[in-house]
Amino acid sequence: MRVVLRLTVLLLPVFATTAPAAEPPSNPTPNFVVIFIDDMGYGDIGPFGSKLNRTPQLDRMASEGMKLTSFYAAPVCSASRAQLLTGCYAPRVSVPGVFFPAGPRGLHPDEQTVADHLQRLGYATMCVGKWHLGDQRVFLPTRQGFDGYFGIPYSNDMGRPTLEGGRSVHPLMRDEKVAELLENEGQRRITRAYTEEAVRFITRNRDRRFLLYLPHTAMHVPLFPHTDFAGKSNNGTYGDWVEEVDWSVGRVLETLRQLKLDRNTLVLFTSDNGPWASKGKAGGVAGPLRGSKGCTLEGGVRVPTIAWWPGTVRPGTSHDGIAGTTDVLPTLVRLAGGDLAKAKGKRRIDGIDISPMLTGQSKTSPRDHWFYYQGTRLKAVRSGPWKLAVMKQSLGMGIRQKPADLNIDEPRLYNLDEEIGEKTNVASGHPDVVARLQKLVAVMRADIGSGRPGPGVRPAGQVKNPVTLFPSRTRRRTPTRPGKPIAWQKVKPGDSYPSQSAPRIAGKAFHIDVTVEPRGSDGVLIAHGGSAVGYSLYIKNRRITWAIRFGNNSIQRLTTDLPDGPNTRLRASVTRTGLGLQVNGGDAITAKPLGVLGKHPQEGLCIGHDNGNPVDSQSPRKRFGGRISGLKVTVGDRLASKPKAPGN
């Protein structure tokens, strides 16, 4: 019992900056190399069971090091990189998704990255590869603790047209300047260029301690293996690029051996998320795991990971203890002799020092649980072998199938030791486990939040006038063509319509008429939009709520009692004078609006449910079980004024 209580103290990082750990080895503090692959699946390399891709260098690395078989990242690119560099779950630092070129947001310059900490400890620091935490200069690696930077600052499918000629290019940067503009075929040189740059950095700093962060552009679509590898594998273009990545890893490790740095260098190989399975042969595979990039099933976030440190990490070993990208920062800082409790700019983190597990000082992981966030929503939690899903889940980015077992909000419990594929819900047989994991969920929701930011969330960085890194043409937006109008007389609960078919409400007055027979059921009557902009009319706990979302952090609600009786007529409106909610033709309750819907919602319109990111996180998630009739959305005149939304 004493051990269980001690673990509980260690494993709730929301209550402490970082967990205590064993003393680092007595030998000189090590160098660090973190190799971060893009979109590589759990089953894409030999050490994790691949029979399609030849990876002799990674096979050797695993035979000389330790496989971490329960190592977790985030579902998508920017979020995963934020976790690794800051030691925080991505929503804590307001990086829940993906940043785009010339965007106004990025990782806040005040965040303390692993490079910041190691730089203050005297380490040479270098980032080589895909950054993807904001491309404005204030967000670049050189402003986040790295002495230098070489790479493409975002994904290789985010090219922009040049001002002259209109060629789609990606900037290859040296520190804060564009060194070269790469067209698509130019990307075939990128893995080799990264590798050569990494080798030069290691060689140049052989006599001092260093951190090399090597986030590869591979395996992100589009695939561009070097011509020396193209067509050489047994698994098409994807296999070609995997084999080039394998070559790159071997080149880095061999450099460390030749310089006699191998026994004082910890190398961590891992991936930023699961495979982009919807891309077919251009995407990878998750092996025995269910799901893919963009989801919180194991296949979306459990990633192939190897730790290599000859003489310290026991060779040929495998560890199934829970760990993740948040743990990289506290682990490296501890091994470097740092103390996060005394660090400059100390900030709350979620990571835990896992060095005792890596060095063999402990047979178990100091981490007992992991939280699965998709965007800002807490979807699941794992503790030991148990994983509890608390919201609907998808199979991954771009996959349209919605299996019935995932499309429910009731808690779903899986024993990952007995069934790693997450197919059998055993919640009914283990109510005590469900209750225990729900308490963990409640603690995290109270801290970081779910859907809405909690008190523990820190802001992202923001600039007022973002620009492209090179002279670029403004992309012409193709006007959205209206879809087939909704036949309101035929709608019924459960229907969904694309946003193009819904009435155009941006900047306009509109009202919704509907008659409902609740039959004791809670649920959304109609919703259009999502977590960015939209509206929702719903019944919950015998209260009617009319919710308008004006922005990510700006929502307004009108609420009134649901009257007794079989049928209730409702009119919800946005007018020149404000918001209104009228029941059975009586006096409307009103409020001055926080703003107008400045743009048409991108997410679809739903009847009797809200199937995407809900407009209002407080709305019921189950489908409305009552009867809906006479539903119609009517659009009026354009609203002339745009009241300012509050600063939240």
Image: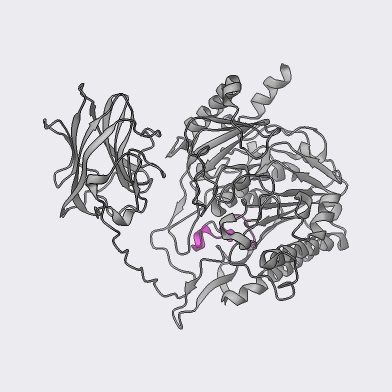
Q: Nearer the viewer, residue 132 or 413?
A: 413
Give me the residue at 20% from left, 28% from top: 567
- Depth check: give the residue in front, 172 or 70: 70
Residue located at (71% from left, 42% from top)? 331
> Extreme top residue here?
1
Quadrant location of the C terminus? Answer: top left
Quarter of the figure that contains the N terminus: top right
In-image side of 605 versus 415 (left or right): left
| Residue numbers of the magenta segment | 134-148
Residue 498 relative to residue 486: left or right: right
Inspect this view and state whether residue 207 appears.
Answer: no
Q: Is residue 473 left or right of residue 627?
A: right
Whether residue 158 is visible: yes
Number of callouts = 0
Instruction: Measuring from the top left, give residue 541's x and y in whole percent.
Output: 32, 24
State the residue in front, 302 or 169. Answer: 302
Rendering coords of residue 453 (x, y %):
44, 39
Q: Residue 254: horizontal and vertical position, in percent?
A: 84, 62
Task: Residue 136: say if magenta.
Answer: yes
Residue at the spot 45% in from the left edge and 35% down from the top edge: 454
Which of the pair 117/629 is nearer the observer? 629
Colouring? one colour
List the single residue furthest toward the front: 490
Q: Is residue 401 above or below residue 283?
A: above
Check if residue 370 falls in the magenta segment.
no
Measured as percent of width and height from the top left, residue 426 is found at 60, 27
* Picture quadrant where residue 195 is located: bottom right
- Quarter occupied by residue 607: top left
